Amino acid sequence: MKKNIIVYYSRKGSNKFLAEQAAATLQCEIVPLKPRLNLLFFLLLSSATKISLGNRSIKTDFKDFESIILCGPIWMGQFVSPLYDFVKKYKNDIQHLDFITCCGSTDTAKNERFGYATVFPKIREILGDKCGKCEAFPIELIVPEEKRNDDQAMMNARLSASNFTGEIKKRFDNFFEA
Ligand SMILES: Cc1cc2nc3c(=O)[nH]c(=O)nc-3n(C[C@H](O)[C@H](O)[C@H](O)COP(=O)(O)O)c2cc1C
């Protein structure tokens, strides 16, 4: 049995970057999720209603892996449909799954309606004991403190090699050391 695999969904690239960093750190395979209908409006609707649009088929046999690290964004306080559809489809094949997200919500607002901490229990609800750790890498960590109240600056921020330093890198290293 192989140890780890990274499975991710990303629209704007931050979670792709995060997933690639995770794959490089763990030196493991990485698989992108490709929704059948990759249109934001329908994905938001599907995330909210849990009416599945489905992902394109994946050749990987997830039963072969001890652990999956799932990575993707949070929208409207939801476990987004490409990730939800993946977990639902492969629930019986998954041995253990950790979830990481690069998201817009901040640490201080994590328990608010759209905060990342409201999403973690939704994954545990589906997977039970198979769900391990959940960790957020909020985009604010790459935005200079004086610009964190600037919605435009927060919206435009993307995680990349040039800003993957400081607090966010420390959080990443702590997560993967554990
Ligand atoms: C329509 C929309 C809704 C969003 N809602 C939330 C939210 O409820 N909570 C949150 O933490 N971030 C939210 N975000 C921010 C994304 O999670 C964040 O931009 C993420 O880094 C995007 O990942 P990507 O670059 O991999 O696509 C939202 C973004 C979009 C576009």
Image (cartoon, rainbow, N blue to C red):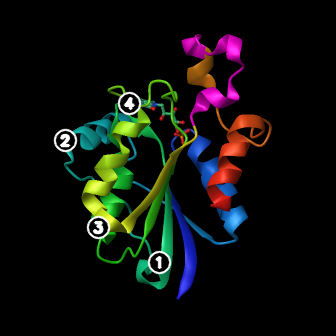
From the image, tell me which residue sits under label 1. 60
Toward the viewer: 3 or 12?
3
**For marks 4 and 1 on the same chain, the one whose residue lies earlier in the sequence:** 1
What residue is pinned by disc 3?
A: 89
Q: Can you identify the residue that label 4 sits on?
A: 111
Which region of the structure is painted magenta? 138-152
Q: Residue 43 location, x and y as percent? A: 33, 41
| Residue topped by disc 2 | 49
- The amino acid sitting under disc 2 is Thr
Q: Which residue is drawn at 47% across and 78% down?
A: 60
Residue 146 sits inside the magenta stretch: yes
Q: Which residue is drawn at 64% across and 33% down?
A: 158
* Residue 120 in view (yes/no): yes
Quarter-wise, where is residue 97 in the image?
bottom left
Image vertical order of residue 27 relative to residue 12, above or below: below
Chain-order first, disc 4 or disc 2: 2
Mark 4 vs mark 3: give the one in front.
4
Task: Label 2, secondary structure: give it.
Answer: helix
x, y percent for residue 7: 50, 62
Decide which of tag 1 and tag 3 comes sooner along the chain: 1
Q: Quadrant of the C terminus?
A: bottom right
Q: Distance between the residues labelled 2 and 1?
A: 28 Å
Q: Which of marks 2 and 3 is nearer the N terminus?
A: 2
Amino acid type, residue under disc 1 in the picture:
Thr
Real-space Cα distance between discs 4 and 1? 35 Å
Mark positioned earlier in the residue sequence (4 or 3):
3
| Residue 9 visible in image | no
Neighbor class of circle 1 (other Cα within 10 Å; few <14, some 14-19, many 20+) is: few
- Does dot 4 land on a helix, a strand or a loop? loop
Amino acid marked by disc 3 = Lys
Cα separation, mark 1 vs mark 3, equals 13 Å
Magenta region, main secondary structure: helix
